[in-house]
Image: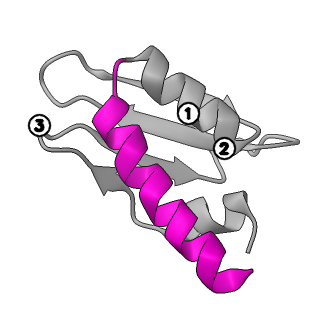
Amino acid sequence: MNWKEYLLSCRGWQDGIGNTVSFSQTNLLGEIPEEGIWLFLDEGLRCGGRNACVLSMEEVEQVLLGCGKKELWNILKEDWERVKEDVF
């Protein structure tokens, strides 16, 4: 299972203060990127959210850490590391 298949197969992640991140093959207009997948960050009523087309797990990390979502990134990363160990 590659990173895209894994992220698309999950329902998303949530940190301790309610920030959530999820992934989709399409953006909100139903458009499919030539490469990558869409990341949707929901910060609840605090700030709104963000979406970005990401091409790698490194870009997922950059987006989340760039928004100050270190806990959320660590949760996602730990799950991915666990899956990688089981698959490979």
Identify residue type, mark 3: Ile
For the residue pair 43 and 80, the one nearer the viewer reads as: 80
The N terminus - image quarter: bottom right
Would you say 14 lies left or right of 65 here? left
Identify residue type, mark 1: Glu
Q: Majority secondary structure of the magenta segment?
A: helix
Would you say 70 lies left or right of 40 here? left
Task: Tell me where residue 53 appears, x and y as whole percent.
Answer: 67, 32
Task: Tell me where residue 13 appears, x and y as whole percent.
Answer: 33, 54
- Does the segment drawn in magenta span residue 81? yes
Q: Secondary structure at mark 3?
A: loop
Q: In the image, is residue 33 above or below residue 48? A: below
For the residue pair 25 and 86, the one nearer the viewer reads as: 86
- How far apart marks 1 and 2 lie (CA) works out to 6 Å
Residue 23 seen by the camera: yes
Task: Tell me where residue 70 appears, x and y as whole percent.
Answer: 35, 30
Which residue lies under the disc numbered 1?
61
- Residue positioned 11% across, 37% down in the render: 17
- Does the segment drawn in magenta span residue 55? no
The C terminus - image quarter: bottom right
For the residue pair 59 and 49, the one nearer the viewer reads as: 59
Q: Secondary structure at mark 1?
A: helix
Identify residue type, mark 2: Met
- Residue positioned 15% across, 41% down in the render: 18
Q: Are marks 1 and 2 in contact (CB under 8 Å)?
A: yes
Which residue lies under the disc numbered 3?
17
- Give the mark nearest the N terminus, 3 or 2: 3
Magenta-highlighted residues = 68-88
Which residue lies under the disc numbered 2?
57
